[in-house]
Amino acid sequence: MFYKVLDGVKIIEYGNMVSAPFCAKILADMGAEVIKIEKPCCGDDSRGLEPFMNDSPGVERSGLFLYLNMNKKGITLNPENPAGRKILNQLLKNADVFIENNPPKRMKAFKLNYTRVKQINPRIVMTSITPFGQTGPYKDYMSCELINAHMGGVGYDSVREVDISQEPIKAPAHIFGFQAGLSAATATVGALFQQSVTGEGTYLDVSEQESIIQNMHSVFRYYYNKQVVNRTDVLDRAPAHILPCKDGYIHHANMEESEWWRFVDLMGNPEWAKNELFKDYTSRSQFWDALKPLILDWTKDHTMDEIYRGSQARGSAIGALYTAKDVLVDRQMEERGFFVEADHPETGKLKYPGVPYRFSGIPRENPSAAPLLGQNNEEIYCGRLGYSKRDLVKLSEAGAI
Amino acid sequence: MMNSAFLKGVRVVAMTQVWAGGWMGGILADMGAEVIKIESNKKIDILRRTIETEGDLNRGPNFNGYNRGAKSCNLNLKNPQGVELFKKLVKISDVVVENQAPRGMPGFGLDYDALKAVKPDIIMVSVPGFGSTGPDKNYISYAATVQSIGGLEASFGYPGGEPSTPSIFMADPVGGMYGVLAVCSAVYYHHRTGKGQHVELAQSEAIMSLLPEVVMEYEMTGRIRPRMGNRDEIMAPHGCYPCKGKDKWVAIAVANNEEWQALCKVMDNPEWGKDEKFANQFNRWQNQDELNKLIAGWTKDFTHYEVMHKLQKAGVASGASLSTEEMNHDPHVKERGALIELNSRKVGNTLTWRSPWKSALTASNPAAPYFGEHNDYVFRTLLGLSDDEIAKLVNAEVIY
């Protein structure tokens, strides 16, 4: 864990891939005890996804899985098996929160929908995360990160200055699955507060599509002026573009007139900047095609950090397109101790992204690495639920755990 | 509207501005908190001043979308009396949220220590771009600068191409949601221990925390993650294909052989579907450029919705690439009530969304407030000032 905020909260995660595991990770990072349930055969599907340690695949070697499941305990369990189900019921009885992201039909078939779970534990908070939510015409539609991004509107509207022949694209990796997990974790902690005040449980129906729509403030504008914006329309702001430089790319994000002139100062006040065509924002936007090569002629001789730090020090908003290599040595993230180290039996010590928040009144602690497949079976089944080691052999042979 | 009134009885003073700030207020109000947004003529939220509203402060579509359910109170913090009134309000509140630049609250004499002196168990949540500490804390943090440093932009773009300039800005909703998470967890902690807290977070780190693959790939293999557009590490087809109509597209993702067979069947089993080049997942991934062209030849005769429904019926994951306009009319989005029309006397009709979850505990929220709508409520009802005192403060540009 990072901060003991949710000390004593007991969570069962029956999740797969990104959204539910990330939701549970956030709560584990805050000190809740998360017991993660995985398929006995092979575990969470994310164990089979890149990146792998030294490009050598293996269920304990996926960077995606290892990040998503830090600070958790891991057990294997098959809820379809009657003996497995009995164990799950015991776990749910003692839990404060149940987090899952399975298709609604499967949860119903497993008799694990809220109506059933509530009968086992009336004060439980149950959080279900699905691509389209538990109701509506698409509730049972199959989906994944790609489909979610496009159905959430952030595919179509994601890139400026595209050629109409180019397909709309999604943002990198599983960022929207993670965002849905973050939304779900926020609602879950809200529900936990309510539970601790009133003793009542609740059901949270979290939709990934709706979580993605939260990035789309364009819906407000469209509603207001009913103007259809084509994805090829360029915003009338310049320069507000990603531009190449000596060792990478910068994002020129000036909004105020003064910021432009500070950037001009960084470039050494070249003669061309005095040209009437570039006198103000509107004019620079209009003559962007003439302006761009002049800026590029300067940026090509300067590094990302020279431009990023030079302009920011002058009060001009420019960002640098940091890759992993750059973020890992960024002085700001280093000073704030954002990246953390965790030791894992299979991969050894690795640096992981940490948490973005700092609590002033709670000491920060060191995180622990993700569990091996079934790592905590004995601890949970024997230590807590009273099964013998011999029982575990039988349960395993029966396909329950 | 359907909301989860988990934070009923929690009062939040919001020194918020622009996107991330207003956004947090909207979610907190959805959760049942009383959100009092402090606004002043000295510095008007830029979302209140948009081109299309021609100077009308009360009709900004983005402002009204984000700030639903909040109360608006005018207070000039550049005046010492304004600062005193702020402190009086803090005394009867539970939480202060803010997304000013890191020098903002200390500049008003309202940093955490000052608030704590007024109310020892106050919870303060700060959501600046790069954090409240560290050498770069004062860097200008627009969404574009924050998400480029947070690692989102370098890996965003078409396969093999340069990085694309994004038109989506995630630093605000992501930083904002972490801010609300911080409020909920600090309120929970306060309930258990009686202790207050200052929670601060960096939006740049918030973005990075959603992109672990970027860092882990480098840590584990020494490689920089390439730009991949719609492509997946192993799934193919996994892309966006042109459809009937102008600039219409549909996304299709095939995870295994069974789904591939189902896709071929929907396409009327074309000859090329039997080609060895596409016989298994690895071959399809290897030959995806060619495969994508062939699939595009089929999708182009149907609308994106037709392809989606056909494929979903057959057990293949597919979704229309919805535009902003289509999002507003989509039957599923409508039935779920994800987007909501609200109206009020001065603000007119506005569109907002609700928080991305539903639960049985419901509350309903009014539209975003007009500028200073709740001055009377805050100064008379909450702080107990008389008409006379209020008039004087208005005159002195304290309530301003």
Image (cartoon, rainbow, N blue to C red):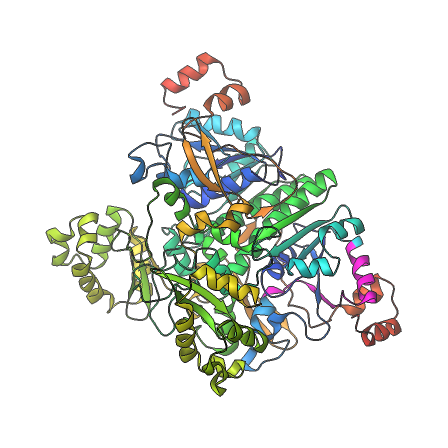
Q: Nearer the viewer, residue A22 or B285?
A: B285
* Left or right position of A284 against A246: left
Q: Position of residue B46 (x, y in %)?
A: 35, 39
* Left or right position of A119 against A145: right
Residue B297 in view of the camera: yes
Q: Is residue B220 above or below residue A229?
A: below
Q: Nearer the viewer, residue B249 or A115?
A: B249
Q: Nearer the viewer, residue B177 or A321?
A: B177
Residue B258 in which image quadrant: bottom right
* Left or right position of B343 against A380: left
Residue A17 in which image quadrant: bottom right
Q: Which quadrant of the figure contains the C terminus of chain B? A: top left
Q: Residue at x 79, y 64 (%)?
A: A380
Q: Position of residue B191 (x, y in %)?
A: 68, 40
Q: Residue at x 24, y 46 (%)?
A: A257
Residue B42 in magenta stretch: no
| Residue lying at the far top of the rendered structure | B388
Q: Position of residue A347 (x, y in %)?
A: 60, 77
Q: Residue at x 48, y 68 (%)?
A: B252
Q: Residue at x 28, y 67 (%)?
A: A245
Q: Which quadrant of the figure contains the N terminus of chain B? A: top right
Which region of the structure is painted magenta? A68-92
Residue A323 in view of the camera: no
* Left or right position of B109 against A2: left
Residue A81 in magenta stretch: yes
Q: Nearer the viewer, residue A222 or A268?
A: A222
Q: Position of residue A364 (x, y in %)?
A: 61, 55
| Residue lying at the far bottom of the rendered structure | B276
